[in-house]
Image (cartoon, helix red, strand yellow):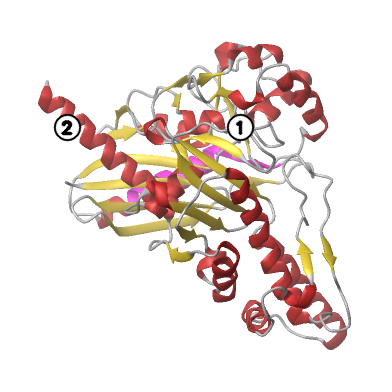
Amino acid sequence: MGIYLGIDVGTSKISVLALEGDSGKPIAVVSEENSSFINTRKEFSEQNPVKIKEITFRLINQIKKRIKEKISGIGITGQMHGMLFLDRDLKPLSNLITWQDRRSVNLIPEIHRKAKEIAINECGCLVNPGYMGATLYWFYKNNLVPGNADKVSFIHDWIGAHLTEEKKLFTDPTDAASSGLFHIKKREWHWEFIEKLGIKKEIFPAIKDSGEIIGFTKEGIPVSCAFGDNQASILGSTYGYREEEVINLNIGTGSQVSLITKRLPELHDFMEIRPYLDKKYILVGASLNGGVSYSLLKEFFLSAGKELWGVKEEDIFATMNKLASRVPAGCEGLLCYPYFFGERGKEEWKAAFKGLDKNNFTVSHFCRAVLEGMVRILYESYQKMQEERQLIVGSGNAIKRNEVLQEIIRQTFHMELKLSPYQEEASYGAALLSMKASSIKRQSGNKG
């Protein structure tokens, strides 16, 4: 069946994976730190798109040199929500403004008021800071849209266009929905909402189905339309499982609990409804407070150790996990609400510890309480989804490297936990989608 490449243009890392079609297994992976961040104002988060492109193409060339067989297809995924402006020739007119950008915070209430005038459930989410919808609105409100801007783009869609000889820009429903300006049922841009925000319709790219072929490389390799990294990670993590039985739990810097469904439910707090493949949806409970909360506790312990006893940095996480394992489930009454970074739509929320007494005021209890709090946020989101599942598939380094966290997940969800077999789930998912798209193309070609 050939070899398929999966490219993941992530915020902190860019990776390219080669998938063997016959076995369905990765045979090579190369990755590099995304060192494209640009130091600007505190509330801004920007990356240099030209440098991102250079890193991506360098990694593609590296993996090509390691593969003897012909490449049969290329799939792409990457960081959702962010945006950059392009001219008619697809040259960047701005930096990539990432999903971490906060410049639009003060405009969010105004955007939400406009959203409520239409059916917000039609978009599947509220527009949050860092989403294309919020950032683009900020540019329009401040009259900062470049005069020769022809299109606004997600970074991996731009990369995909440059991989092809056709060099035409497209996006797909999974990425478009991450903007907050997409009609998830009609699977098209939400033109009514866009008009209310005063944004020109012409600036949005055309939409193709996820994985649909958008063009060919100079060697004739088909390139699939890019799709969002959340959906790619779910595809890569749950491949081989029955979709209707599985929850995907991803804990990295942030965290998500996701499940695939055919129904279109009502929107709830801490839940987004995102398009998926084959006209299905993903229910997503996302939190900003994943592994970063545990890292924050580690930094506190390290700082205290240095200041009080001159402790040098070592593998503190291993010590924290060992201490947490000594504490029984429930932390003997200690509860942690780990909203150290607020939440999307709830930026004012703060973290708190509750139930402290002389018995649980220990380092061990604090370690376990933070871990339990991280998982509790995800479990509460899962309960609001009102869908029964039998199995959890865990992905993300925070889960894979922490056996105590794995135990807490099993105890909280009362389910079996399986770990996804591969590290680069999003790249793997992109390669799988490319393989699927190429297979469909071959079948349709055979029928013709």
Residue marked by disc 2: 442
Q: In which quarter of the image is residue 306?
A: bottom right
Residue 247 percent location from the top left of the image: 48, 53
Residue marked by disc 1: 266
Judge whether 68 appears above or below 314 on screen: above
Q: Which residue is drawn at the image coordinates 43% and 54% (left, top)?
A: 425
Q: Which amino acid does label 1 sit on?
A: Glu
Q: Which residue is drawn at the image coordinates 54% and 68% (left, top)?
A: 410
Q: Which of 344 and 259 is in front in this view?
A: 259
- Going by the image, does 69 lie left or right of 242? left
Res 254 seen here: no
Judge whether 290 appears above or below 402 on screen: above
Circle 2: element type: helix
Question: Bounds of the magenta span?
Answer: 45-62
Residue 21 percent location from the top left of the image: 22, 50
In reply to whether residue 238 is colored magenta, the answer given is: no
Circle 1: element type: loop
Predominant secondary structure in magenta?
helix
Residue 187 percent location from the top left of the image: 48, 22
Q: Nearer the viewer, residue 266 or 327?
A: 266
Q: Which amino acid does label 2 sit on?
A: Arg
- Going by the image, does 49 lie left or right of 306? left
In reply to whether residue 58 is colored magenta, the answer given is: yes
